[in-house]
Amino acid sequence: MRFQLTTCLLLIGSYFAIAQTRVENPTDSILAQQLDEVIVTATRTERQLSSLPLPVTLVGKKQIIKSGSVRLNEILNEQTGIITVADESGFQGVQIQGIASDYILILIDGVPLVGRSAGNFDLSRLTVGNIKQIEVVKGPSSSLYGSEALGGVINIITEKPKTEALTGNASYRIGSFSQQDINLDIKQAFKKFRYGFFANRFSSNGYDLNEDVDGNTVNPFTNYTLNGRLYYDFNDNLSLFASGRFYDQNQDAGFTLDSIQYQGDTKEQEWNAHTRLDHKWTPNLTMAYELYYTNYVATELLSDPISTAILSDSDFNQKLFRPEVRGSYTFSSENNTETTGFQNGTLTAGIGLQLDELDRTYFDNTINFSSQYAYAQYDFDPIENLNVIAGARFDNHSEYNNQFSPKLALRYQLNDNLSIKGSIGYGFKAPDFRQLYFDFTNSAVGYTVLGYNVALDKLKELEEQDQILNVVVTQDNLSKPLEAESSIGYNLGFNLKHGRGNTEVNFFRNDFKNLIDTRIIARKTNGQNVFSYVNFDEIYITGFEINSAYKLTNDLNISAGYQLLYAFDKQKKQDIKNNQVFVRDPNNGQTIALSQTDYFGLVNRSRHNANFKVYYDIPVAKTNLNIRLLYRSKYAQFDTNGNGLIDIYDSSFIDGFVTVNAAASKTFYNNFTLQVGANNILDYTDNNIPTMPGIQGYVKLNYQF
């Protein structure tokens, strides 16, 4: 079902005609959320968003509902400095401040999710149907969260039951390509016991952007999410939280090779079990004892339905078990009115153990990692109007060198309307299972990829089989341990309140070293290469972001955001400066040396990103209207001229484009809400962007009880 643009505009426009008058009662606004919401991810303690010295984005439940988003990637893509990017498989990962998905930690209620494809976490796995808010901490966060938080943290906070009456909602949404989203969410609270249950079914018939190529761009799929949460208060000082989550997806799969159409399916399943005991020992000391287990399983089977020949039969089974104990102590002096910041600060500390296991096709054995960690953070006000957060974490890992991750953040309130803040922090990402133990040979092309820890032994096996023509690295190059990737991140900005508005500006820079990439270690007798992994890249990413929200009236809110981004490889810039990088000029066919201005930067990074949003409430008609404009400037997907970097002569650039999303909602009979909307109203498509199938209209009916 493909909605026409004119129909969507007429439906949205009809809502404006409903309103006859406007009441002057305060309503929810994006500005109010930005200033008043409490978050926990940035410090692991409750802090008001506007008082934090760190760059944080918060997306509240009302904003999610009004936008009509159903998956996490949709709502994140509308936030300043956050871009979703599709990888070769079509999965959408997330960039924060230009830092790739590999380096962004994804949490649900403070615990991590696993199951990445080539380091990329598919955000469309996550429904937003029972989310209270989404908290995004930008920049290195390893001082609290360790590996994978090198570029930032996204924490999904689910909703907690509040009232004794049975409350909840049931919704059904249908849209283009027969996309259906069905939700059931119920909650109830008694004197000591509370519970919540959530179920979601999400499906689509898929779509095809290129009819000249066999198969669909995105194949039909169906997935289910179930989540149950229990809360029990033993007394005023002791409470228990337990949560279980299950995700299951089946998707058709197909691939054409040598005129043979292979068919099959891919399956994903995920289990999460999380329990936490919160104990308030004294008015100043609280402790949390936490256990967490998750298991992610993915399988794929592709075969020829005629000959039953198998093209691909792969399995991926990852498990993580993590116990953690943490505490928070608030120093105070009730009788001394001239207390120092140290006497009123909050100390947060924790210790934990993490056990990772991966059983995967292309691994010889099941691989196990273990790590122990400890962290501490002190949040205090040494003088009036100055807030300081200082923290550090130590990680001891079985597969790489110990890591020490410090961080310092400050915020100074210059006056009632203006504050300035800055932070510096260290982040790291451990080498993953694939980079250490992969053993894969492409059966169609013939190249081989080997994990660093098994490369020497596997090369010897290939040599004994007479598959190696020559080895291009020394044994010493494959004997030293692969280092963890690391970065130092800087953020400096200010927040300005102006009347009914608020503006925040943040300058950032991240310097990376020991980035892990593939390299050729040997050449095969079939003309193909053997690849492994190595530490060599040093890059930097820098720029600034500006966000501004303004409440024109009690019912009309506008906001705008912009990010300027530069992302370069330091060695490539030096090579260009030394006239060592060349390219063939497509205009005259001559080979020329690249200049610094010809170097565009890293793949999948746009120089400019912007958004503009308008939210309009009509209380007398119980109606909400909104329109959101998103702009992304051109970016390149890969190097096409073989000089090892992205320059202006490459041909893989995606031109800049604008995406327009809109939604209109009306509540009737107090409990029913009808929402009509469309994403990508301008119907932008590109065969190279599999996640953008053109305009996507939808209708949603929600029953609140």
Image: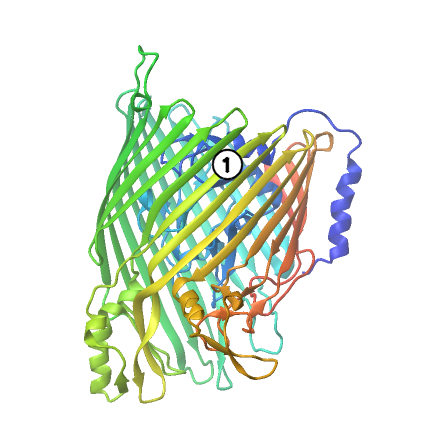
Q: Residue at x 19, y 69 (%)?
A: 479
Amino acid tagged 1:
Phe
Using the rendered view, name the quadrant where residue 568 is placed: bottom left
Left or right of 594 on screen, residue 347: left
Residue at image position (35%, 34%) is 389
Residue 14 lies left or right of residue 340; in this view the side is right
User: Is residue 524 in sight in this rendering?
Assistant: yes
Left or right: 498, with 402 as reference point: right
Q: Is residue 662 left or right of residue 516?
A: right
The percent position of residue 27, horizontal first and vertical second, equals 63, 29
Image height of 247 relative to 158, above or below: below
Q: Position of residue 434 (x, y in %)?
A: 31, 65
Q: Which residue is mark 1?
A: 494
Does residue 605 lie above or below 402 as drawn?
below
In which quadrant of the rendered image does the N terminus lie? bottom right
Placement of the C terminus among the 4 image quadrants: top right
Using the image, determine if residue 517 lies above or below residue 80: below
Estimate the x, y position of residue 468 in percent, counting from the top left.
Answer: 27, 86
Q: Residue at x 28, y 61 (%)?
A: 358
